[in-house]
Amino acid sequence: MKNILLVLVFLFSFDCYAIKPVREYVATPDSLGMRYKQQVLNTVDGYAINTWVIKPAEDKDTKTTLVLTYADSGNMSYWLYHIKALTDNGFTVVAYDYRGFGESSDFEINPLNLYYNEFAIDLQTVLGWTKKNIKGNKTGVLAFSMGTIVATLALQQEKVDFLIGEGFVYEPGAYVSKIKELKDRDIVLPTGADGYTSKLKKIKCDMLIVAGEKDKFTTIEESTKIARQRNNRETLRHRGNHTEGFITMTQDSFGDLYINELIRFTQK
């Protein structure tokens, strides 16, 4: 329990409004008793993307795969307790590191960029491999914060069964303005950011938008606007701050109430 708390405190105390990749893994899935397969995938533009594939016990398998697309700091090892909670409840999880993160290829990063368009290529690569190699499952994306932008861009090319996004960015320019106001930081947008909102409207798969009542960066109101764009979208509210859903929706085990909602959404 002490180790869990240490990792979670570090994860959620990260200043998640600038890109801060970490190369070294704090742990690997087997340290939490999870069996996993490491898979290195090659993108069309020549980058190697490191992935972990973690499957649930056969008797719990919901036949649903989540491609974990995290926020802008750390690497996939900082999400191991999320992954364990998900696989313990029957989800297959495919976790990966963006280029420049973890053990994926080197990539020069300006920490003041909000995101990189290239990250969407990384996700497209992982989704393509996942759909080809993990058959018989529903396949969706579970994205957090910056990861919701990456998912929105990637899903212009790759089809999935569903998208779950927490701390969902509605409009990058407005998000940058909030960071300036609340953090006094000048964030840079990549080319094409002005077309993001129109791309968000084009996503056709079922969507669950998770929003924190205390989140000043990706607000309840903005999440509601995203949900209203199509009739197959819904919102899930929690009482916490930006990307604190697993913490605030915990009753008996880490994120159990949150995961119950994911099961309901993905199995309907």
Image (tube, rainbow, N blue to C red):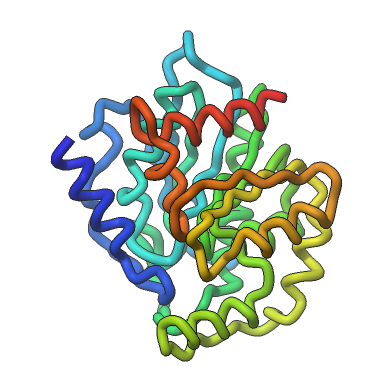
- Identify which residue is drawn at 57% across, 53% down: 211
In the orientation shown, which residue stands out farthest toward the top? 59
Q: How many marks?
A: 0
Quadrant of image for the N terminus: top left
Q: Position of residue 18 (x, y in %)?
A: 41, 76
Q: Can the viewer see residue 209 in this picture?
A: yes
Quadrant of image for the C terminus: top right
Q: Work out whether residue 36 or residue 83 is closer to the camera in this orientation and state it.
A: 83
Q: Work out whether residue 100 or residue 168 is closer to the camera in this orientation and state it.
A: 168
- Identify which residue is drawn at 76% across, 45% down: 233
Q: Position of residue 9 (x, y in %)?
A: 24, 54
Answer left or right for 11 relative to 137: left
Reply above or below: 210 against 153. above
Q: Work out whether residue 20 or residue 120 is closer to the camera in this orientation and state it.
A: 20
- Identify which residue is drawn at 60% across, 72% down: 117
Q: Can the viewer see residue 48 in this picture?
A: no
- Identify which residue is drawn at 52% across, 77% down: 114
Reply above or below: 170 against 97. below
Quadrant in which residue 43 is drawn: bottom right
Q: Position of residue 157 (x, y in %)?
A: 75, 56
Answer left or right for 126 relative to 14: right
Quadrant in which residue 153 is drawn: bottom right
Q: Position of residue 7 (x, y in %)?
A: 23, 49
Q: Work out whether residue 246 or residue 49 is closer to the camera in this orientation and state it.
A: 246
Answer left or right for 242 relative to 157: left
Answer left or right for 194 relative to 90: right
